[in-house]
Image (cartoon, helix red, strand yellow):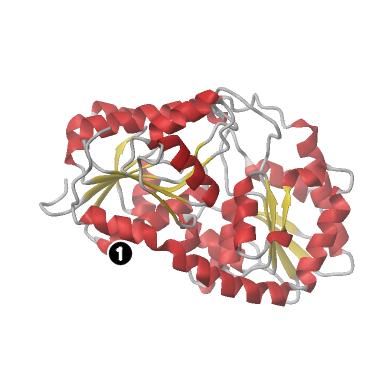
Amino acid sequence: MSNPGQPRILILGGDLAGNLGDRAIRAVMLDHIRGLAPDADVCVVSREPERDRDEFGVRVVASSAPALLGMPAFLRSLDAVLFGGGQLLQDDSSQVKNMHWAVVLRGIRVLGRRPLIGYGIGIGPLQTATGRFFAARALRALNVCIVRDARSAQWAAELTRNRVPVAVAPDPAIALRPESEAAARAYLAGTERVEPVPGEILIGVAGRRFFPGRRGILPSAWTAGRSPEGPDFELFKERLASAINRFAEGKKVRVLFFPLYQSAWQDDAKHARDVSARLTAPSHVLGLRCTSRMVKTLEGLCDLFVGVPMHSTIMAMGMGVPTLGLAYADKTQDLFAELGMAHWSLPVARLAAADGEPLFHDRLAQLYARREEVRSALRSNWSALEARMSPYREWMTRLLQRTPAPCVR
């Protein structure tokens, strides 16, 4: 139980059980809360309660978001609810997700009558009437919505008919604090059993299975093992390995694979092993049984980084590593463009095209040749991006001042 005067905040959203990118966002959310209210009683929903208690120092109150709807007394005891942690409102892979959040957020709003803040929300794509309908219902349950990019802001304004205040701030993971370099090197050598040799070019790679053109009703978590990979993804893996092999010719190269999502429905480690087996250079698929802060520092040890998941590229670029983004959604290309790095982002499907391998190799070779120029630009532009994080702190401050929630719409 929280003490009198101790703010109690519930955090919802994100797939923390398998996704280190979403865990990065959760870590930053907690940094923001505790920077303003060190004694806050932070409550979460978790399928891995022991892990989340140990890593985040939070109180686990339920194993699923819908279970909260049977806890009205708890909901009324809250000071606020934060909803955030990934690309939460979209229908590119499931039409159930938006319905789920519409029901949960509306239920929490009605039963608890406490302020709800959308925190670093990603919205879209929304290509179906059903997807847009339920996304609108979810957003209208919020008191304010902080979105992570201009596209999401346009969706939020349209779907709420400008009835919910919308602010734009970079993805929260931008502000993730890394571990020390010494701790990362010790982890890499001790836990992962990897000791890079001086003089090697260390390339970090984070892959991700993608589904071009896939539209479904049920989320991937419910259809694990029944979603075919398709020929494009196999070509992607072949050409990724071929391009890295070509780049490594005549050089001392070592490749580290970063499987940021490890679950039954999205097994990055399996696909990393597929690519690793085709490489001529020494390579290692990391276990990553560590925090997102450690992952960021490990990525920072690399000389070059190649990433499909957006949060893998955020962590690498945040450490000043020249990075090539392989985008399966607009959000990645938007991020690179905002950083003045548009040339270093390619649609992931391009690697499956006939010219995919030479295109990727040439871009990787250019990135290495211009690495010092890219590092310098990253340092300058990253600072400007971090400076735009203020909406999170501003709205959190208002929450902790116990500003009354507007009436339920």
**Residue 40 seen in the figure:** no
Q: Residue at x 43, y 62 (%)?
A: 389
Q: Element at badge 1?
A: helix
391 or 13: nearer the viewer: 391
Q: Looking at the picture, does residue 144 appear above or below residue 173?
A: above
Q: Looking at the picture, does residue 13 appear above or below residue 287?
A: above
Among the 4 quarters of the image, the one containing residue 115: top left
**Dot 1 corresponds to which residue?**
35
Please identify the quadrant where the C terminus is shown. Answer: top left
The spot of residue 309 in percent (x, y) is 62, 49
**Residue 374 seen in the figure:** yes
The spot of residue 210 in percent (x, y) is 68, 38
Q: Residue at x 83, y 45 (%)?
A: 238
Q: Looking at the picture, does residue 82 appear above or below residue 290?
A: above
The spot of residue 285 in percent (x, y) is 67, 52
Q: Is residue 92 left or right of residue 247?
A: left
Q: Residue at x 52, y 73 (%)?
A: 182
The spot of residue 200 in percent (x, y) is 75, 71
76 or 123: nearer the viewer: 123
Among the 4 quarters of the image, the one containing residue 215: top right
Q: Is residue 58 left or right of residue 223?
A: left
How many marks are shown on the rendered structure?
A: 1
Among the 4 quarters of the image, the one containing residue 213: top right
Q: Is residue 309 left or right of residue 80?
A: right
Near mark 1 (Cα within 10 A), the count class, few <14, some 14-19 or many ≥20, is few
231 or 160: nearer the viewer: 160
Please identify the quadrant where the N terminus is shown. Answer: top left
Q: Amino acid at mark 1?
A: Gly
